[in-house]
Image (tube, grey):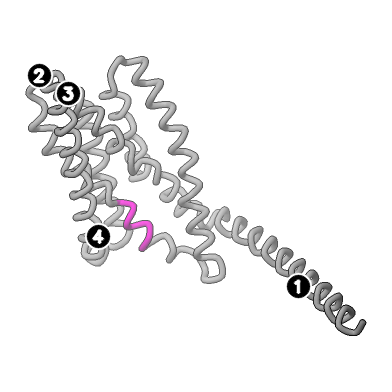
Amino acid sequence: MGASRREGTFALEGKGQHCEFLASLEALRGSVFKIASAPHYSQHNVYARFHFGLWAGTVYVPSAVTALAEAAGRVGPAAAQLASRATMLVAFATILGCLLMPWLAERLGRRGALAFYFALMLIFVAFTFGKVFYLGPSALPFFFVCLFFLGFGGANFAVYTLWLPEQYPTECRASAFAFSTSFARFGGAGITFLVGAGVQHYGSLGVPVALTSLAFALACC
């Protein structure tokens, strides 16, 4: 009898603590949203929300290289091999950009380093897909050279992990950083559909992908 009474007491206490925990969690969530959305942090949120531009060009590299390879007479396995090598080159350049990010951040500052990566993406997304892609069968060597700089500029996301958390107070740093960067994924999903519509309109992926460089132009303003 006494044991069952104690078990009931413990169950009530556990339920009460669980309710208190949920209430405090809800209050914290509301405060994080208010802080992350406050005018004081709006500039930093804008930088974070342009995060979707990171993969604006690189995600279309395999398709672009395959199209160029087929135009040059390399079809089937040969085209697939070139697309794989292009993807490896972009990944290698991005890793290199991440490794050099701390040095750039110390030399140029957080904002300067991000502007440097954004400038690379702005220039090479527009040039690679807006100009080089349309050079025809002879475009492949130049396209691969541009891919290195495109991949290097793609390391701009590394600056976010260093700089953005410093913009928020300690009590909400992790949550505000996660909210700001994750919010941009919704924009990225929308851009994917817009690029697809552009490809259908223009009949190729060159110009629509090149236009995604405008995101970096706006972010650098």
Residue type at numbered disc 3: Gly
Alpha-carbon distance for marks 2 and 3? Answer: 10 Å
The local secondary structure at tag 4 comes to helix
Q: Give the x, y percent position of residue 218.
A: 37, 40
Label 4 CA crowd tier, 10 Å (few <14, some 14–19, many 20+): many
Nearer to us in this view, 162 or 19: 19
**Marks 2, 4: nearer the viewer:** 2
Residue 69: which quarter of the image? top left
Disc 2: CA contacts within 10 A as few (<14), some (14-19) or many (>=20): few
Q: Nearer the viewer, mark 2 or mark 3?
A: 3
Reading the image, the residue beneath label 2 is 73
Q: Secondary structure at mark 2?
A: loop
Residue 76, label in figure? 3
Q: Position of residue 31 (x, y in %)?
A: 64, 61
Q: Residue at x 27, y 47 (%)?
A: 154
Along the polypeptide, which appears first: circle 2 or circle 4? Answer: 2
Q: Horizontally, is 15 left or right of 122 in the view? A: right
Q: Is residue 158 magenta?
A: yes
Query: Which residue, given by chain and number where applicable, does mark 1 sit on?
Result: 17
Mark 4 or mark 3: whose residue is earlier in sequence:
3
In contact (CB < 8 Å): disc 2 and disc 1: no
Q: Which mark is residue 101?
A: 4
Instruction: Judge from the rendering whether residue 138 lies leftward or rightward of residue 126; answer left or right.
Output: left
Quadrant (top left/top right/bottom left/bottom right) for the C terminus: top left
* Sequence-first disc among 1 and 4: 1
| Residues shaded magenta | 156-162
Amino acid found under the numbered disc labelled 4: Met
Among numbered discs 3 and 1, the one appearing first in the sequence: 1
